Amino acid sequence: MDYKIALSICIPIGLAIAAFGSAIGLGKAVSAAMEATGRQPEASMKILVNMIAGCALIEALTIYALVLSFQLMAKI
Amino acid sequence: MPETHSVSTHFELPNIISILGKRFGGAKFPEYAPILENIFFSLLVGFILSFIAYRASRKHSLVPGRLQSGVELIVGFFDDFVCGIIGPQGRKFTPFIGTLFLYILAMNLLGLIPFMKSPTSSLSTTAALALCVFFYVQYTAIKENGPLGYIDHMMGRPRGIIAFTVFIPLLIFLIHLVSEVIRPLSLALRLRSNVWAEDALLTIATGFGFAGIPLAVFSMFLTILSSVIQAVVFCLLSTIYFTLAMPHEEH
């Protein structure tokens, strides 16, 4: 098996796993934020800011995987 | 047209420096092109922001004009933001965090203007910003806790019987050291990856010609949203690192 075949198979799978993990994490974060807003609608702006910060932290891991996949794609 | 060959990671739209370089640059220009682009556009953003600040602070009047009141609104927002997280002693960090936010936001949004490039799409700029934050946080930790208190803080403040075992504080020191070093790395990589991904998306979306206009509009919206969010997250994390470096009061 050539290294190109191995890379071509594994890069999309790795990226898909990263996207899947981030979707689950973001879903939990946003659902918790929605529930908190439902309990206390006056605090919705503060909850929104904290939710955006949490989502950016989770998203960063997926974007690391994306950048790595671009670097690897150049080696095919 | 996008600069994509068969499979390449060089997704960039042409900007002022690259166009001039293709016309007038010699054979060695492609080597220095990224360096020149980053420096030129960072300095451009710096000059524009400094000029706006200079014009806004020239005449202090009790009834402020439009520019002065706009700038005061922005500064008041940063003051509330930083002091809300650090506490009343966070006043001295407001200039740094505010400058960081405006600088990063302006650099991120510069990529949307035609013939300009966001300097934050390269690791050099974001690593420089993250290193500034890292050194300032360590300096603040040493100044607020004292040198001995700094080492105490890095060892997790051992008290009681744990302070006499050599092994546990040393282990905690190593773990804390690793986590401190990882912070600027993650800050730099997060900002750079997000802005670079936006640039690549814009390059691909505009490479489709007229048929890709909906995709280009959608990607511009994503770019603006992502630029603002990444600037907010960078400053929020820096503020939290400052909070963690100062001495905590135990109840």
Image (tube, coloured by chain):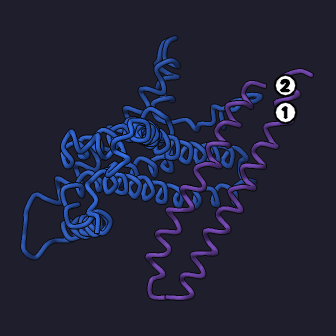
Chain colours: A purple, B blue
Q: Is residue B182 visible?
A: yes
Q: In the drawing, does residue B204 fall left or right of residue B233? A: right
Residue farthest top in this picture:
B27
Residue farthest right in this picture:
A1
Chain under numbered label 1: A
SS state under label 1: helix
- Is A43 drawn above or below residue A60 in the view shown? below
Residue B88 at x, y percent in the picture: 20, 67
> Foreground: A10 or B206?
A10
Residue A4 at x, y percent in the picture: 84, 25
**Disc 2: which residue:** A4
Residue B190 at x, y percent in the picture: 52, 46
> What is the number of callouts on the image?
2
- Is B246 drawn above or below residue B60 in the view shown? above
SS state under label 2: helix
Chain under numbered label 2: A
Residue B131 at x, y percent in the picture: 36, 37
Q: Which mark is residue B167?
A: none
Q: Quadrant of residue B232?
A: bottom left
Dot 2, how many residues are within 10 Å of its Cα: few (below 14), some (14-19), or many (20+)? few
Q: Quadrant of residue B86?
A: bottom left
Instruction: State how far apart marks 2 and 1 are (Cα).
Output: 6 Å
Amino acid type of disc 2?
A: Lys
Q: In the drawing, does residue B4 fall left or right of residue B145? A: right
- Is B34 drawn above or below residue B70 in the view shown? above
Q: Residue at x 18, y 43 (%)?
A: B146
Dot 1, how many residues are within 10 Å of its Cα: few (below 14), some (14-19), or many (20+)? few
Q: In the drawing, does residue A74 fall left or right of residue B99? A: right
**Disc 1: which residue:** A8
Quadrant where the C terminus of chain B is found in the figure: bottom left
